[in-house]
Image (tube, rainbow, N blue to C red):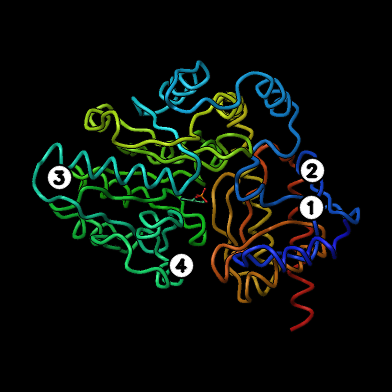
């Protein structure tokens, strides 16, 4: 099929929840993807922080091949070895004592919110059902997770959502303390906000949130679906803050491009949950667990994480130079390989100009261009990405 045929079928048959550009991706290799007309794009999105090891990683490809030849799926009615090995690896490398697996980020958030509700009911008995989330947050699209997602236009058409969610201003320690009252069962926060425009929490803020949760008997949930698993140059984004949650949600890069989510939690939370309380047909299949094991082993290696930090510092310097050079770029914010550039034009304009320059970048809200390259990108490829991004800015500037 040629490009026009694919686009025509998408227009005719696919529910129109996304606006996609006018090319069709057919192949990937490392930090590059190729379209059906032979054009090459340097990938600054990684499938929204999913393809952390880039495209066609030999280790991931071999793991999928081998695992597919064994058991693909048996359901959670039965034991399998890859399931327990992966759970042990996640526990050994984190604050957590127990893991629940699911299939996406929004499901991980649903699970975490349900576990917090059950824990509060089981521990306190009294009505303690309120949830605190923050301005700028994104936690997913299903009803529960959506209730904690800040963006009004995502929520409004689907109301009524889950009641009892209170939003407090992100990075305002005093307001967070005020919001975390005794009737709160859970507080959910991204240590680095992704979709909301790449905003880093301050250490002071997270410390105050942690202390307020402890005073109120509320559980602290860190949503590391986007910022976790090495993206910031630490295995967990919260390591840089020295603040530890009670639960953590993971998904995007966890299974190398296959769908998988997880909720990590401490033993006291796990003690509140028993057989039948939650479940999933697909979750933690032996194939997806083996792929996730391969990803986790790679991204948690100290030299891999050190390389991400080094690339992050390089990217930081290059992006601050881009902001100096481009009248339309206001500020670059980020850490590791997770960056946002605040623009004076619609981010979509820069994203589209990027396609012409042979790069994939995406937006995070209307005015922020976001970069989430594969963690395996080289310094030379990062330079190329920024050079082309600068050219995209210049092209848009020349139109003004
Ligand atoms: C993407 C994202 C989600 C939702 O994940 P899905 O897999 O798309 O459901 C939740 N939280 C954060 C922080 C995310 O970035």
Q: Which residue is mark 2?
A: 28
Q: Which residue is mark 1?
A: 25
Q: Which residue is mark 3?
A: 215
Which callout, 3 or 4, points at the residue further toward the start of the chain? 4
Q: Nearer the viewer, mark 3 or mark 4?
A: 4
Say the numbered circle drawn on residue 154: 4
As drawn, is 320 to the left or to the right of 211? right
Q: CA distance from mark 1 to mark 2?
A: 8 Å
Q: CA distance from mark 3 to mark 1?
A: 51 Å
Report the residue that reaches farthest toward the top.
Answer: 81
As drawn, is 73 to the left or to the right of 132? right
Q: CA distance from mark 2 to mark 3?
A: 50 Å
Which residue shows up at 37% across the image and 64% down it?
Answer: 135
Which residue shows up at 78% across the image and 64% down it?
Answer: 7
Which residue shows up at 69% across the image and 51% down it?
Answer: 44
Q: Is mark 4 within 8 Å of ligand 1?
A: no
Looking at the rendered structure, the secondary structure element under dot 3 is helix
Looking at the rendered structure, the secondary structure element under dot 2 is strand
Q: Nearer the viewer, residue 16 or 140?
A: 16
Disc 3 crowd rating (10 Å Cα; few below 14, some 14-19, many 20+) is few
Q: Position of residue 80 (x, y in %)?
A: 49, 18
Q: Nearer the viewer, residue 334 or 98?
A: 98
Q: CA distance from mark 3 to mark 4?
A: 32 Å
Report the residue that reaches farthest toward the left.
Answer: 126
Q: Residue 131's quadrant in the figure?
A: bottom left
Q: CA distance from mark 4 to mark 2?
A: 31 Å
Disc 1 crowd rating (10 Å Cα; few below 14, some 14-19, many 20+) is some
């Amino acid at each position: 099929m040629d490009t026009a045929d694919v686009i025509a079928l998408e227009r005719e048959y696919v529910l129109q929840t996304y606006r996609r550009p006018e090319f069709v991706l057919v192949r990937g290799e490392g930090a590059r993807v190729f379209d059906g007309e032979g054009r090459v794009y340097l990938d600054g999105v990684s499938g929204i922080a999913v393809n952390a090891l880039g495209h066609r990683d030999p280790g991931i490809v071999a793991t999928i091949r081998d695992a597919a030849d064994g058991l693909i799926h048996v359901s959670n009615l039965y034991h399998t070895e890859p399931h327990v090995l992966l759970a042990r690896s996640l526990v050994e490398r984190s604050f957590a004592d127990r893991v629940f697996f699911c299939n996406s980020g929004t499901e991980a958030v649903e699970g975490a919110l349900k576990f917090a509700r059950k824990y509060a009911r089981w521990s306190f008995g009294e009505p303690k059902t309120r949830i605190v989330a923050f301005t700028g947050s994104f936690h997913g699209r299903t009803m529960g997770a959506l209730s904690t997602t800040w963006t009004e236009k995502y929520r409004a058409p689907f109301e009524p959502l889950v009641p009892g969610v209170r939003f407090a201003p992100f990075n305002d320690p005093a307001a967070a303390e005020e919001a975390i009252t005794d009737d709160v069962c859970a507080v959910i926060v991204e240590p680095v906000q992704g979709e909301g425009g790449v905003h880093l929490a301050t250490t002071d803020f997270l410390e105050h949130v942690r202390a307020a949760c402890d005073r109120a008997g509320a559980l602290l949930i860190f949503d590391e679906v986007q910022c976790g698993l090495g993206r910031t140059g630490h295995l967990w984004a919260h390591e840089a803050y020295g603040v530890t949650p009670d639960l953590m949600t993971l998904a995007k890069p966890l299974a190398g491009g296959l769908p998988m989510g997880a909720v990590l939690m401490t033993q006291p939370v796990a003690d509140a949950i028993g057989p039948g309380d939650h479940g999933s047909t697909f979750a933690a299949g032996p194939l997806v667990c083996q792929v996730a094991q391969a990803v986790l082993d790679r991204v948690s290696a100290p030299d891999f994480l050190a390389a991400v930090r080094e690339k992050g510092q390089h990217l930081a310097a290059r992006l601050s130079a881009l902001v100096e050079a481009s009248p339309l770029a206001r500020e670059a914010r980020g850490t590791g390989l997770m960056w946002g550039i605040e623009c004076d034009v619609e981010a979509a304009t820069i994203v589209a100009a990027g396609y012409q320059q042979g790069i994939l970048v995406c937006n995070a809200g209307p005015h922020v261009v976001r970069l989430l390259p594969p963690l395996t990108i080289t310094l030379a490829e990062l330079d190329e990405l920024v050079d082309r991004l600068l050219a995209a800015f210049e092209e848009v500037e020349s139109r003004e």
